[in-house]
Amino acid sequence: MRWRVPMHPIEHVLPGAGALLDIGCNTGAFLRYARERFPQIQAYGVDLNFLALRQIPRHEIASCQSVSYQLPFADEVFSCVTCIQVFEHIPPGERRATLEEIWRVLKPGGRFVLSTPHAGITAWADPNNLRFRWPRLYRALIRTGLRDRAFTREREVIWHDHFHLHEIRELAGTRAWKTEYVYRGGCLTPFLDLLCWPLYRLGLDASPVNRWLQRLSGWDLSLNLGRAGYNLLIALRKAESYSEAAPSC
């Protein structure tokens, strides 16, 4: 059975979007999926990871190396901006400026979709923080992957922060954002990720076991678990006027 996953950012991309920007696009997998779902979309991506950017077909996706707090685009050019499991990698001192830049490049009425770890009851189990809690176990499981090799050449890999909703709202500041969707799901996510890592390392990502784990993950992410959720997804719309903005965000 295939579960509808409200936590998947693709469910919140505006169907009639013209230009879509993915911040932290890595190898462009999400942007390729978005173009399959919405063929009219013009896909753009930025990332610090130059090794990953090299793998993106230039004829499909316009991509460039850039920091998130100084985007190389004009004002109000994107219908939709996504930031998927990247915000936690941005140093704390750059997060507010990143949201300011997203506001700047987003068209009035455009949508910003943020997916990031939530400060829920299983935040302690974040597998990406294994590198700090148990570095030997982390190296044994994944060694130094493509992500870490590129990151350490650009900047230090930092601890994965997990966020409460009010923290994101505070970082968004006084800009006229209208909150359209808030979802917290995936209580089992960190444990399923740990089980999948050895399979990816062994090249068994297409194995029946991994497919079963992915189905279980889809079910887990289909549940809105509130404060218990491991992942937080927020869809914000840039209000066309300040009077339109919701007072909560």
Image (tube, rainbow, N blue to C red):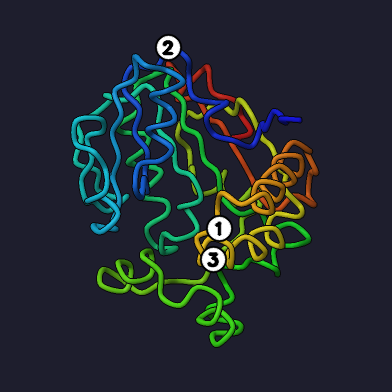
**For the residue marked with disc 2, what is the amino acid?**
Gly
Residue at the image position 50 percent from the left and 58 percent from the top: 88
Left or right of 50 in this view: 228: right
Q: Secondary structure at mark 1?
A: loop
Determine which of the numbered discs, if any, sits on residue 240 in the image.
none
Q: Earlier in the sequence, mark 1 or mark 3?
A: 3
Task: Work out whether residue 51 or residue 121 is closer to the camera in this orientation and state it.
Answer: 51
Residue at the image position 43 percent from the left and 27 percent from the top: 34
Distance, label 1 to label 2, CA atoms, is 37 Å
Q: Earlier in the sequence, mark 1 or mark 2?
A: 2
**Badge 2 density bin: few <14, some 14–19, many ≥20, Cα 10 Å:** few
Residue at the image position 38 percent from the left and 32 percent from the top: 32
**For the residue marked with disc 1, what is the amino acid?**
Leu
How many badges with numbers are in the image? 3
Left or right of 239 in this view: 126: right
Task: Work out whether residue 79 or residue 242 is closer to the camera in this orientation and state it.
Answer: 79
The residue labelled by disc 3 is 160
The residue labelled by disc 1 is 204
Q: Note whether 234 is above or below 129 in the view shown.
A: above
| Image quadrant in which you'd find residue 160 | bottom right
Determine which of the numbered discs, if any, sits on residue 16 in the image.
2
Q: Earlier in the sequence, mark 3 or mark 2?
A: 2
Distance, label 1 to label 3, CA atoms, is 27 Å
**For the residue marked with disc 3, what is the amino acid?**
His
